[in-house]
Image: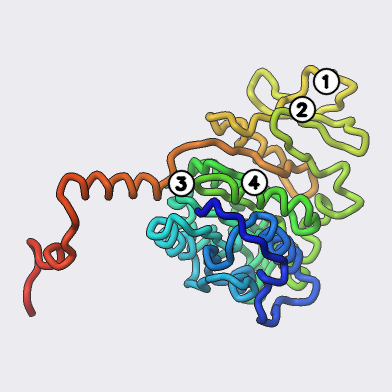
């Protein structure tokens, strides 16, 4: 990516396409946050690419005045990998949904994270298939009644952050569609990270799964339900910061009253810890959509990115063998005429 600072405005990043999401959809808030953030990053539109799969969220590239590709179902991480490796000078963003990214696209997602491809991946999680009119998704809760599960889902849902951490993602975060400032700050840190950045965004589908996260992200609920993670600070929350998180001798995290345990007992958040176990425990602290839930950056560690490794191999090969000959390669052993 270029170090040159480019001066732009939100209008420069907004395409001339009519935004076609249902009125009240949480996607509007995410789009606004991204369009407002891009000028602050000081990057150029011609060096920026948005790649999406299939789903409501995957309309995103149409609404950004950048290069983009509305690709095929679940394959956005694979296509974006090709772009990022072939053109390391570009800023490559992936926009996907819980169905697109964790169902048919599950393997593509985990391998992009495992390889640490230099991508910023935004996953819109509304726990439903919205584009195809309301079937249950890989993140829908057990018992979810939908058109495809009329007796209630019996599938245990994926925890997107746990999946990302299990794939050794080097940057993992969570935000939600009702807090533009929080979204922009999380997206900013994800973009600044070299390697695969994964951001889960709790996003409301007001037509097929309205209010799925209201008990957590609703304005009245946030003070008691939203745990704001800050690196190097004690994990505490509540209207008066009266609640906190501690780690027991068994390694389990528990929510406590600060007055009962004291400030010194609280867990200190360490997003840069090499071992992902702490981030994993925080990702699994909330057991449902009605209990205190951590938000912010769970993990941010440095490790070599995939594109740099490929580039080093190509340089080493070129130094050893000289310039490559594509014609000779195509006609080497194993070719035949028909």
Mark 4 vs mark 1, foreground winner is 4
Query: In percent of the image, x 77 and y 19: which residue is there?
Result: 265
Q: Which residue is mark 4?
A: 189
**Res. 148 in view:** no
Residue 64 in the figure: left or right of residue 331: right
**Total of numbered circles in the picture?**
4
Q: Which residue is mark 1?
A: 263
**Res. 280 in view:** yes
Q: CA distance from mark 2 to mark 4?
A: 20 Å
Mark 3 vs mark 4, foreground winner is 4
Q: CA distance from mark 3 to mark 1?
A: 37 Å
Say if mark 1 contacts mark 2, CB within 8 Å: yes
- For the C terminus, the image quarter is bottom left
Q: Earlier in the sequence, mark 3 or mark 1?
A: 3
Q: Earlier in the sequence, mark 3 or mark 4?
A: 3
Q: Residues within 10 Å of mark 3 (few under 14, many from 20)?
A: many
Query: In percent of the image, x 45 and y 52: which residue is there?
Result: 112
Q: CA distance from mark 3 to mark 4?
A: 16 Å
Q: Nearer the viewer, residue 100 or 264?
A: 264
Q: CA distance from mark 1 to mark 2?
A: 8 Å
Q: Secondary structure at mark 3?
A: loop
Tell me residue 327's x, y (percent): 14, 68
Q: Which residue is mark 2?
A: 234
Q: Earlier in the sequence, mark 2 or mark 4?
A: 4
Q: Earlier in the sequence, mark 1 or mark 2?
A: 2
């Amino acid at each position: 990516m270029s170090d040159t600072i480019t001066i732009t405005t939100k209008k420069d990043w907004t395409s001339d396409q009519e935004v076609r999401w249902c009125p009240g959809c949480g996607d509007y808030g995410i789009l606004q946050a991204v369009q407002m953030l891009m000028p602050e990053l000081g990057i150029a539109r011609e060096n920026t690419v948005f790649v999406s799969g299939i789903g409501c969220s995957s309309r995103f590239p149409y609404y950004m005045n950048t290069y983009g590709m509305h690709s095929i179902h679940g394959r956005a991480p694979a296509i974006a990998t090709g772009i990022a490796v072939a053109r390391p000078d570009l800023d490559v963003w992936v926009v996907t949904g819980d169905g697109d990214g964790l169902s048919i696209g599950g393997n593509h997602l985990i391998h992009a994270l495992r390889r640490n491809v230099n991508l910023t991946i935004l996953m819109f999680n509304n726990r439903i298939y919205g584009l195809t009119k309301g079937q249950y998704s890989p993140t829908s809760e057990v018992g979810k009644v939908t058109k495809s599960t009329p007796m209630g889902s019996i599938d245990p849902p994926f925890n997107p952050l746990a999946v990302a951490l299990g794939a050794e993602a080097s940057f993992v975060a969570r935000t939600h569609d009702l807090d533009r400032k929080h979204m922009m700050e999380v997206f900013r840190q994800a973009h600044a990270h070299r390697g695969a950045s994964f951001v889960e965004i709790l996003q409301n589908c007001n037509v097929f799964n309205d209010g799925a996260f209201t008990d957590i992200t609703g304005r009245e609920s946030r003070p008691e339900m939203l745990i704001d993670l800050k690196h190097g600070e004690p994990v505490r929350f509540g209207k008066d910061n009266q609640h906190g998180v501690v780690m027991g001798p068994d390694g389990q995290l528990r929510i406590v009253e600060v007055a009962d345990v004291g400030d010194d007992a609280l867990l200190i958040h360490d997003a840069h810890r090499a071992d992902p176990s702490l981030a994993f425990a925080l990702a699994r602290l909330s057991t449902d959509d009605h209990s205190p839930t951590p938000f912010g950056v769970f993990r941010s560690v440095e490790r070599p990115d995939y594109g740099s490794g490929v580039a080093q191999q190509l340089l080493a090969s070129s130094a050893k063998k000289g310039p490559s000959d594509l014609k000779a390669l195509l006609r080497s052993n194993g070719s035949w005429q028909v």
